[in-house]
Image (tube, rainbow, N blue to C red):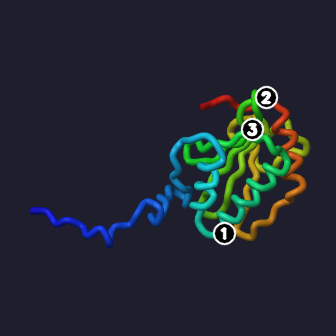
Amino acid sequence: MGAIADKSTRRSDATAKPVLLAGGNPQIAKADGDAPVQAYIAAMPGWKSDVGRRLDSIIVQTLPDVRKAVRWNSPFYGAEGRGWFLNYHCYTKYVKVAFFDGASLNPLPPGESKDENVRYLNIFEDGKFDEAQFADWVKQASQLPGWNGS
């Protein structure tokens, strides 16, 4: 005969801690819209959540009609009819922002990729990055043909 858990000791889904994958990246189900992106940001561990809020805020201020989704446990941002232009992902020591057509941005984002078109911006715990430059990259990237993966 198995024991039955007392309802008062069960945790509801609302109070359950998010599952964190390698490097502390939140596991968030694939979905479209702002809500899953906000769930991802809320689940980012420690200082990374503040970085996620800043990135999201700058992106929305720069491109108010931005499309949002979570794919492969990462927030994606896109422009209607042009595909996805950016995503970010938590790693142990930084948040990695990927510009899918970053090689077309001026100036180039600093991080290179194995893919000649992709460029990265890594944001570390001190949270320092040039927000005006980031906004300019978002504006430029949103005007390029984006990545159309699901």
Task: Tell which circle, 1 or 2, labels the residue nearer the N-terminal end.
Answer: 1
Q: Nearer the viewer, residue 13 or 78?
A: 13
> Is 75 placed left or right of 11 in the picture?
right
As shown in the figure, which amino acid type bears the numbered disc 1?
Answer: Trp
Task: Tell which circle, 1 or 3, labels the residue nearer the N-terminal end.
Answer: 1
Rendering coords of residue 1 (x, y %): 9, 62
Q: Nearer the viewer, residue 149 or 14?
A: 14
Q: Is residue 93 above or below residue 118?
A: below
> Is 20 placed left or right of 52 in the picture?
left
- Say whether residue 118 is visible: no
Q: Which residue is mark 1?
A: 47
As shown in the figure, which amino acid type bears the numbered disc 3?
Answer: Phe
Which mark identifies residue 145?
A: 2
Determine whether the residue tagged by mark 1 lies in a helix, strand or loop: helix
Q: Which residue is mark 3?
A: 85
Q: Quadrant of residue 58?
A: bottom right
Q: How far is the residue under mark 1 from the one under mark 3?
A: 24 Å
Q: Nearer the viewer, residue 114 or 117?
A: 117
Determine whether the residue tagged by mark 2 lies in a helix, strand or loop: loop
Q: How far is the residue under mark 1 from the one under mark 2?
A: 32 Å
Rendering coords of residue 78 (x, y %): 73, 38
Decide: few, some or many residues near mark 1? Use Cα within 10 Å; few <14, some 14-19, many ≥20.
some
Q: Is residue 56 above or below residue 76?
A: below
Q: Quadrant of residue 100?
A: top right
